[in-house]
Image: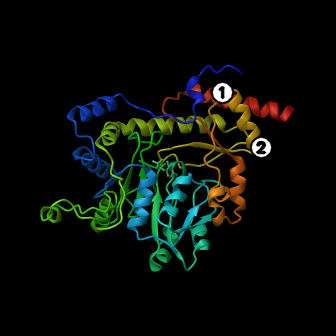
């Protein structure tokens, strides 16, 4: 168990390129215009068409998408934003970027996602937004609290960084009417190299989002026609997606069916291989409807298992250390016992499209080996 016969099992995550991406980037470079341009706009149109939504606004990252969406939703200083502690730190940093206060909450240990009861219990008079994280690609259904949220003017901004292509009980993620943010970072379900996209709720919101990602500069043709130079209309940052990144996404998108199948097959292979290991609880990503982004298990004594698997060359990871325990977020700490326990038990197995059934077998064999030696010692 000390030699690693399958190098792909050594990586927890890995970008997957189909080959067409390099050519697409070369075309953009040869063209000589590689800032934000019509290639980016074509990517926006194709993502919108894929999701079945009227519009999509491409930005430089998933973090930028969240920052932009929270800004467009009017969230700012003094506002409280409900956010699960168990998420990538980017979700929290985006809340802080708009000057709002994160209110950390628990997740359902079975799914690692928020549910409507958790949200209902966390509402305060200062709550202005909820950011559900679609963990592992799983959709979060807040329908039972929707009326309460609407009545109080609370916005739902979905962190769907894991969930490009997933469906939930109410339809495709991004197309259910909420303000939704996707990431197209290197290891996400679809990659642009780096990138993200905001799915706005209305044409007006789309305009705000476009203005924000272009340094607050006036965008409409009609307005621009009357100007010499440009006009800055509000606060904004340099968040537009370049044509280089968009070209990568445009090359990936037509191949997404392959991505989707590969990820489902891989997740199911793990599920089948893990069924008879008693100590292991598999996190339920709703694989029939989701495009799985991670394969996570819960296991008591995780740290020992983590180190032993690392030592045998298996690329395990932890998604994620709870944010309410991070030094930078100490001001917003509140006791979250379920999340703290998850923080000690979650383990992400290698999960990426280079992996084969043999890789899965090697990972699970190594896991079994670690567990049996642990029991004996
Ligand atoms: C990746 C990720 C983000 C941020 O996306 P970037 O493109 O890396 O900025 C936000 N939230 C979650 C849950 C993520 O996994």
Task: Give percent across and percent down for residue 144.
Answer: 52, 70
Residue 179 seen in the current view: no
Tag count in the figure?
Answer: 2
Front one among 33 and 107: 33
Q: CA distance from mark 1 to mark 2?
A: 19 Å
Q: Nearer the viewer, mark 1 or mark 2?
A: 1
Residue shown at the point (41%, 43%) measured from the top left: 194
Task: Give percent across and percent down for residue 111.
Answer: 60, 53
- Circles 1, 2 touching at the beta carbon (< 8 Å): no
Q: What is the quadrant of the N terminus in the image? A: top right
Answer above or below: position of 179 versus 249: below
Judged from the image, the secondary structure of the residue bearing numbered disc 2 is loop
Residue shown at the point (65%, 50%) measured from the top left: 321
Q: What is the quadrant of the C terminus in the image? A: top right
Task: Give percent across and percent down for residue 97.
Answer: 48, 61
Residue shown at the point (32%, 49%) measured from the top left: 47
Answer above or below: position of 161 versus 108: above
Q: For mark 2, does the 10 Å Cα neighbourhood hold few (<14), some (14 to 19), or many (20 or more) residues? A: few
When asked about the image quadrant of residue 173, the answer is bottom left
Residue situated furthest front in the rendering: 229
Task: Give percent across and percent down for residue 51.
Answer: 34, 52
When asked about the image quadrant of residue 103, the answer is bottom right
Front one among 226 and 288: 226
Answer above or below: position of 79 versus 23: below
Please report whichever mark, 1 or 2, sits nearer to the chain's N-terminal start: 2
**Residue under numbered circle 1:** 313
Query: Is residue 367 found left or right of 145 in the rendered image?
Result: right
**Residue under numbered circle 2:** 301
Residue situated furthest right in the rendering: 377
């Amino acid at each position: 168990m000390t030699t690693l016969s399958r190098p792909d099992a050594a990586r927890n995550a890995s970008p997957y390129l189909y080959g067409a991406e390099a050519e697409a980037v070369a075309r953009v470079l040869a063209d000589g215009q590689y800032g934000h341009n019509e290639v980016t706009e074509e990517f926006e149109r194709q993502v919108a068409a894929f999701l079945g939504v009227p519009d999509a606004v491409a930005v430089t990252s998933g973090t930028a998408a969240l920052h932009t969406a929270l800004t467009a939703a009017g969230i700012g200083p003094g506002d409280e934003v409900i956010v699960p502690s168990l998420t990538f730190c980017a979700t929290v940093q985006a809340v802080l970027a708009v000057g709002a206060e994160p209110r950390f909450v628990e997740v359902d240990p079975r799914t690692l996602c928020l549910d409507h009861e958790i949200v209902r219990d966390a509402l305060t008079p200062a709550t202005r937004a909820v950011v559900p994280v679609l963990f592992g690609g799983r959709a979060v259904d807040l329908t039972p609290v929707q009326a309460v949220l609407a009545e109080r003017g609370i916005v739902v901004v979905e962190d769907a960084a894991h969930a490009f292509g997933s469906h939930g009980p109410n339809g495709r993620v991004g197309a259910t009417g909420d303000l939704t943010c996707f990431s197209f970072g290197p290891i996400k379900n679809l990659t642009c190299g780096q990138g993200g996209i905001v799915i706005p709720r209305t044409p007006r919101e789309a305009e705000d989002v476009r203005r924000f990602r272009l340094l607050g500069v006036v965008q409409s043709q009609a307005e621009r026609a009357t100007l010499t130079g440009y006009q800055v209309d509000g606060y904004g940052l340099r968040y537009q997606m370049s044509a280089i990144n968009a070209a990568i996404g445009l090359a990936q998108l037509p191949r997404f069916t392959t991505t989707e199948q590969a990820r489902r097959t891989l997740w199911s292979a793990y599920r089948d291989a893990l069924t008879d290991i008693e100590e292991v609880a598999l996190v339920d990503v709703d694989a029939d409807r989701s495009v799985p982004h991670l394969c996570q298990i819960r296991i008591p004594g995780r740290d020992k298992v983590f180190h032993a698997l690392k030592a045998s060359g298996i690329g395990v990871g932890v998604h994620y250390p709870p944010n309410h325990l991070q030094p930078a977020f100490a001001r917003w700490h509140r006791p979250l016992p379920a999340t703290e326990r998850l923080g000690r038990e979650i383990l992400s197995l290698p999960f990426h499209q280079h992996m084969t059934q043999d890789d899965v077998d090697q990972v699970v064999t190594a896991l079994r080996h670690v567990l049996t030696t642990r029991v004996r010692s």
